[in-house]
Amino acid sequence: MSEKTIFKKIIDREIPASVVYEDEQCLAFHDVRPEAPTHVLVIPKKEIASLNHLTAEDEALIGHLWSVIPRLANELGLKNGYRVVVNCGPDAGQTVDHLHFHLLGGRNMTWPPG
Ligand code: 5GP
């Protein structure tokens, strides 16, 4: 069996994280190396390696994650806007092979991203 990712270990409470939201399908916690005043990772509890690994049966799950994100942004006080980023694959800089949505806010975001 392949080794658990760091995010699976967080889901299984084998390593600590600053959790801000949890339900049956997903977990959200503060990024350990924040790139903005608010930097939260929203992840499905189901082990999906990346966007490229989604299947048709994940559509409802992904819809659920997208509905959690704006509610969470509101609860975190991101009244002036926020950015959601998904890095997919090496060119995008994905470092953890468990699908995650970066929710970033609390400062002005530049465009184009780096
Ligand atoms: P990626 O680069 O794959 O898009 O994003 C992975 C993110 O996970 C990075 O922003 C990194 O700081 C964060 N991260 C890596 N290990 C941990 C950890 O153990 N705990 C938390 N809370 N975040 C982590």
Image (cartoon, helix red, strand yellow):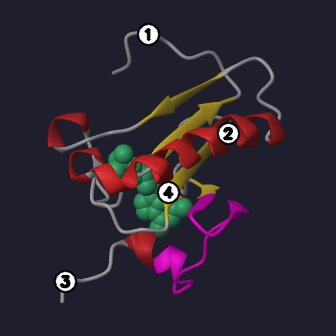
Sequence order check, earlier mark of 2 and 1: 2
Which quarter of the rendered image does ligand 1 occupy? bottom left
Mark 4: secondary structure? strand
C-alpha gap between disc 3 and disc 1: 37 Å
Q: What amino acid is at disc 3? A: Ser
Density class for disc 4 (Cα within 10 Å; few <14, some 14-19, many ≥20) is many
Q: Secondary structure at mark 2?
A: strand
Of residue 60 and residue 96, the one placed in the foreground of this image is 60
Q: Residues within 10 Å of mark 3 (few under 14, many from 20)?
A: few
First in residue order: circle 4 vs circle 1:
4
Seen at 75% across and 39% down, the residue is 71
Cα distance between the residues tagged 4 and 1: 25 Å
- The residue wearing badge 4 is 43
According to the picture, the residue beneath numbered tag 1 turns out to be: 111
Q: Is residue 15 visible?
A: yes
Q: Nearer the viewer, mark 2 or mark 3?
A: 3
The vertical placement of 102 against 97, above or below, is above
Tell me the element at label 1. loop
What is the C-alpha distance between the residues marked 2 and 1?
A: 18 Å
Query: What residue range appears in magenta?
Result: 9-28
CB under 8 Å between discs 2 and 1 = no
**Location of residue 46 with respect to 64 vertically, above or below:** below
Q: Amino acid at mark 1?
A: Trp
Q: Which mark is residue 2?
A: 3
Q: Nearer the viewer, mark 4 or mark 1?
A: 4
* Of the image marks 2 and 3, the number of the one nearer the N terminus: 3
Look at the numbered disc 3 and give the secondary structure of its residue: loop
Q: Compare marks 4 and 3 and give the one earlier in the sequence.
A: 3
Please tell me which residue is depicted at 38% across the width and 54% down the height of the picture: 58
Residues under labels 4 and 3: Cα distance? 19 Å
